[in-house]
Image: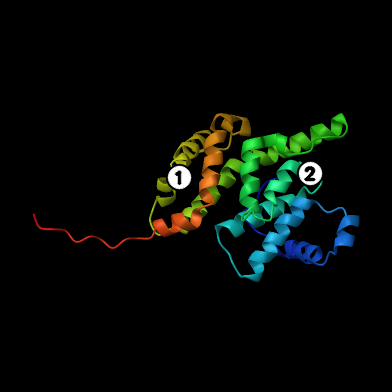
Amino acid sequence: MTLSNKYFFGPLFLIILFLHGLTTASYAQTKVNPLLKCLALEEEKYHKIKVHNSRSKLNIELLNEIAQTSELQVKEQYLNQICAKNEANPAERLLEFHLVHGLELFELGGSSNERNLKVATISEYQRQLPQVLMRHLANLQSELATANCLEKNIPEIKKISEKIKYLEEDLALDTLKPHRKDITVIFNKLKNFAEIKRNCRQKPEQKKTKE
């Protein structure tokens, strides 16, 4: 299982249309992964307002993966935070929780064989998430008017970037354990991305004064 840079809109929109048509009663009787529903409704929102930006890209990338592993369930305590009504970016929060909590994010009940299969599936998936983070940060930077402005506003990005680039693909989430605080700080500061974007607008060059 690998995360893909290609986005398969067809199956996703079928999911979105299906979820959009669910009534409260039918949802209660239908076993739908609540995280899948959460991100699908977020994708529907982006589609309605015709937004295609870094956060919509992240949402659809994670949504594609959840659609393939819908048997995996996020613990309710985390799900409630990811999909809270006041959460502006559920996909971003999901990525943060993946990087900070690792396997702890998921329900791992069942038989020993079932648990082992879940752990193997999640671990394989999560090994790719540091690179997903790097792509997401690069996409956010591409929306800014000045180079390296995201890193200037969020200095913690440099430390995490250097760690991820040094280890490249051989990176288990456990390797990032010492940096979980920095990861949390990064995502907390990203909540103010609109303000960062305003601060990064190019300023007119000041006229040089004669000595």
The residue that label 1 is drawn on is 154
Residue 8 visible to an observer of this rendering? no
Residue 190 spot, x, y in % from top left: 52, 50
Q: Is residue 27 left or right of residue 148?
A: right
Q: Secondary structure beneath disc 1?
A: loop
Q: Secondary structure beneath disc 2?
A: loop
- Quadrant of the rendered structure where residue 47 is? bottom right
Residue drawn at (56%, 40%) of the image: 184
Report the quarter where the C terminus lies: bottom left
Residue type at mark 2?
Gln
The answer to whether residue 119 is above or below residue 153 is above
Q: In this view, does 68 lie to the left or right of 6?
A: right
Report the quarter where the N terminus lies: top right
The answer to whether residue 208 is above or below residue 187 is below
Of the numbered discs 2 and 1, the one sitting upstream in the chain is: 2
Measure how far apart labels 2 and 1 are at the Cα level: 32 Å
- Say how many tags the image has: 2
The residue that label 2 is drawn on is 73
Residue 173 spot, x, y in % from top left: 62, 34
